Image (cartoon, helix red, strand yellow):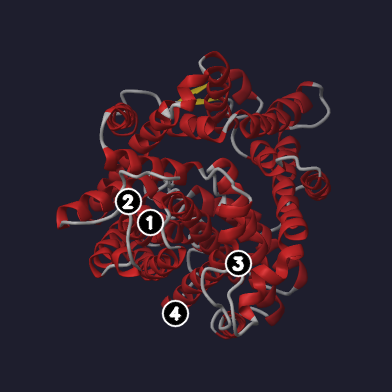
Amino acid sequence: MENKDIKYAGSWKEQFSARGIIIGIIGAVIITCSSMFIALKISSLPWPIMFVALASMFALKACGKTNINEINVTHTIMSAGAMVAGGLAFTIPGIWMLDPDAEVSTLSLLVVTLGGVILGLIFTALFRKHFVEKAQLPYAMGQAAAETLIVGDRGGKKAGILFSSMGIAAVFTWLRDWMTAIPATLMSGRMIAYGSYGGIWLSPMLISVGYIIGPVAIGVWFLGALIGDCGILIGGQAMGIIDGAAAANIKSSLGIGLMVGTGLAIILKEILPRAKAIFGPMFRKDGQGDSIVPLRWAPILMIVLAFLFTLVLDMPVIASIITIIGVWIATAMSCQCVGQSAINPMEIFGIIVLIAAKACSSIGQLEAFFVAAIVAVACGLVGDVMNDFKAGYMLKSDPKAQWCGEAIGSVVGAVVSVVILIAILGAYGAAAFGNPELFPAAQASAVAAMVGGISHMPAFIIGIIVAVVLYFLKFPVMTLGLGVYLPFYLSATAFIGGALRFILDRAVPQFEKSGTGSVIAAGLLGGEGVVGVIIAIIIAVQAMI
């Protein structure tokens, strides 16, 4: 992407600057705190990239002469801690939901979180080139962030369009989420009667994601929703074949199986054939292959992590090894999933690996949560920063500078996340987790429910087989699995954006060729994302007071 009007960095120091690091760390602390509270409080986590991109741009411009790459590296530092907090919040509270008297040491929480971060950093370095450059996945959030920085920096007519659409989405989101003057969803009573969350989420962000990703991938995503909800949940019950509980188990197990199968297929088709280029940096003195940085230290660090997981977390050696291998597969799944759909079900990836660990070793209930948390933290980190790396690829940033920024932000986020979780536990007690009035933590509740294993194994196995076959046939099966697994209203909302793109590309092709459509989508996405983070910060401050 050539933009002659844009100020690019001329050296490493102009990208990875001292002031950028300081601003990034301050932002990372704020975003991590708010992310932990919002993840526990309302069981969701807004993508931070749009907020941190704008915050970094305004902060650095206020400091004086800057460039778009310094802004990009700074917002990578800022955003890295958010999904680390999400990985912890979406898993660990389940421990106290099952056993309010459970004792978990601070050291254990730090080993879990920092272990997930270190593994996430390793696999980010190894996978970035494949998923961002070679596979050319959309990474809608990263595209929108890059577009926002470019248009905002250049000014002119498109900047007016960008910030106008951003303002409209911001006002809408504030009225919806803070003032509750607008309903968040429009639900179908008939579908709900069958156990389906049928309806539409009134979300400019998700509609914009659907528009940016495009009609093909979104069409497959919606097909999965039709199979899962209209086919299995509603159709199965309406025809009297299965009852509601069985239908729900089949739906969730099939969706998880499709996602696991996609992860295995990615490893088999994309990663293993290029293993020398991707994993060579861990075993070669010279060169770094596809990696951002040389990683000869990575195998030793993995052995150290396996030792710490066994010694500090009391996990069997086999479970520790499976966790590390599981992170490898799960982070590949996360890269693909976020790249294609802008959805990162990190707790699901954690559940998948904890089930594998339970199947292969005598792992206890507490240790099962540790496995899920390590995987979720790694997947949250890798999935999130791939958006930053997509933006960096479009903006010609040095990926090594971004990776160093990711390392700083993620370590800060890991420590802050643990401190906040311990503070919440001390202030509210174990009973606060799962309490609808305090911290519902729905994802952690789902992890607690799945500690016992996959609810419908035949559907899970069928999903794996189907996914592997379809992936080798070049079918976008990850989005199909997401559609089967996720609530229908999310898929339907994204489908509106994809359908709108399909119509406009044919009726008014110049609209997208001129870039106007993408600019509006970036603005709408950014407006909801920024306000979502602001509301999260307000909630966090109120909770602490």
Q: Earlier in the sequence, mark 4 or mark 2?
A: 2
Looking at marks 4 and 1 on the same chain, the residue that comes earlier in the sequence is marked by 1
Q: Secondary structure at mark 1?
A: helix
Q: From the image, which quarter does the C terminus lie in?
A: bottom left
Residue beneath label 4, please?
Answer: 107
Depth check: 66 or 107 in front?
A: 66
Residue annotated with mark 2: 52
Q: Position of residue 212 (x, y in %)?
A: 51, 34
Mark 3 vs mark 1, CA separation in Å: 24 Å
What is the three-letter code of the residue carrying label 3?
Answer: Asp
Q: Quadrant of residue 138?
A: top right
Q: Amino acid at mark 2?
A: Val
Q: Nearer the viewer, residue 27 or 107?
A: 27
Image: 55 above or below 193: below
Residue in the picture at 53% in, 43% down: 342
Q: Amino acid at mark 4?
A: Leu
N-terminal of the pair, mark 4 or mark 3, is: 4
Query: Relative to residue 179, is residue 279 depicted above or below?
Result: below
- Percent across and percent down for residue 242 are 80, 32
Q: Position of residue 530 (x, y in %)?
A: 32, 41
- Which amino acid type corresponds to the residue marked 1 in the rendered image? Ser
What residue would you read off at disc 3? Answer: 290
Residue located beneath label 1 in the image? 79
Badge 3: residue crowd in 10 Å (few <14, some 14–19, many ≥20): many
